[in-house]
Image (tube, grey):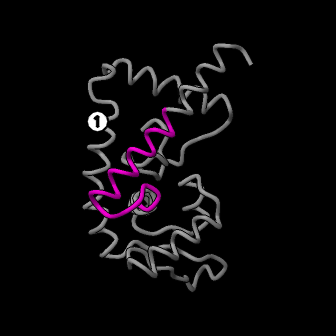
């Protein structure tokens, strides 16, 4: 690893950890949900309100077991999500955004967007942010990774959006 690689990775790692903590804190304080919970609701919404559990896990970049636990929590404790089975696809469990989940997402979305704006606001010009996004998308593509096109712009599950 070169010195430049180590410095760049350290900055990306610290930025991601600090940003996630800031977003999580803002969401918990102002909307009563964690960043992971917001991510799940936003990702489901971006998929039309419903997704197979495996598809949801991939889009969120979570493990299948972690996604299953989070969906179960949001179903049992909050009623924000419902697990369903489809007669045409008995092998898979689906997660579905409920009306309560849509209402919770409508509450958390402005909090999320304001927190993201506060992290970036005024610190870099739009040209710098565009360059940063392009550079990170280049690294993503160079590693053979791709973003799920079904994710939404107010979710960390959508790199570069």
Q: Which residues are magenta?
A: 15-37
Q: With 53 as the anchor, is 81 left or right in this view?
A: left
Q: Position of residue 110 (x, y in %)?
A: 25, 51
Work out whether residue 153 or residue 119 is closer to the camera in this orientation and state it.
Answer: 119
Q: Quadrant of the C terminus?
A: top left
Residue at image position (68%, 36%) is 144
Residue at image position (45%, 78%) is 75
Disc 1: CA contacts within 10 A as few (<14), some (14-19) or many (>=20): few
Q: Position of residue 45 (x, y in %)?
A: 38, 62
Work out whether residue 57 or residue 122 is closer to the camera in this orientation and state it.
Answer: 122
Q: Which quarter of the picture shows residue 87?
A: bottom right
Residue at image position (64%, 64%) is 64
Q: Main secondary structure of the magenta part?
A: helix
Q: Which quarter of the picture shows residue 19?
A: top left
Please determine whether, in this image, residue 149 is positioned above or below residue 108: above
Residue 19 part of the magenta segment: yes
Q: Position of residue 62 (x, y in %)?
A: 59, 56
Q: Which quarter of the picture shows residue 44?
A: bottom left
Please determine whether, in this image, residue 94 is positioned above or below residue 118: below
Residue 30 part of the magenta segment: yes
Please determine whether, in this image, residue 15 is positioned above or below residue 64: above
Task: Find disc 1 in the rendering and name its residue.
Answer: 118
Work out whether residue 137 or residue 109 is closer to the camera in this orientation and state it.
Answer: 109
Please determine whether, in this image, residue 34 is positioned above or below residue 121: below
Report the residue that reaches farthest toward the right: 1
Residue at image position (58%, 61%) is 55
Report the residue that reaches farthest toward the top: 3
Q: Quadrant of the N terminus?
A: top right
Q: Position of residue 154 (x, y in %)?
A: 36, 47
Q: With 89 as the anchor, is 79 left or right in this view?
A: left
In the structure shown, which secondary structural element does the residue marked by tag 1 occupy? Answer: helix
């Amino acid at each position: 690893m070169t010195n430049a690689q180590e410095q760049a990775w350290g900055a990306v790692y610290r930025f991601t950890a600090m940003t996630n903590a800031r977003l999580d804190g803002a969401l918990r304080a102002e909307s009563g949900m964690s960043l992971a919970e917001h991510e799940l609701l936003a990702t489901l919404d971006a998929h039309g309100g419903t997704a197979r559990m495996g598809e949801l896990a991939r889009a969120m970049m979570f493990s299948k077991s972690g996604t299953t636990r989070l969906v179960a929590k949001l179903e049992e404790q909050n009623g924000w999500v419902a697990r369903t089975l489809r007669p045409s696809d008995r092998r898979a469990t689906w997660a579905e955004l409920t009306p309560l989940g849509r209402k919770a997402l409508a509450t958390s979305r402005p909090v999320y967007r304001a927190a993201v704006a506060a992290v970036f606001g005024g610190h870099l010009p739009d040209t710098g942010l565009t360059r940063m996004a392009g550079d990170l998308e280049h690294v993503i593509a160079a590693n053979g990774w791709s973003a799920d096109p079904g994710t939404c712009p107010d979710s960390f599950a959508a790199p570069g959006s």
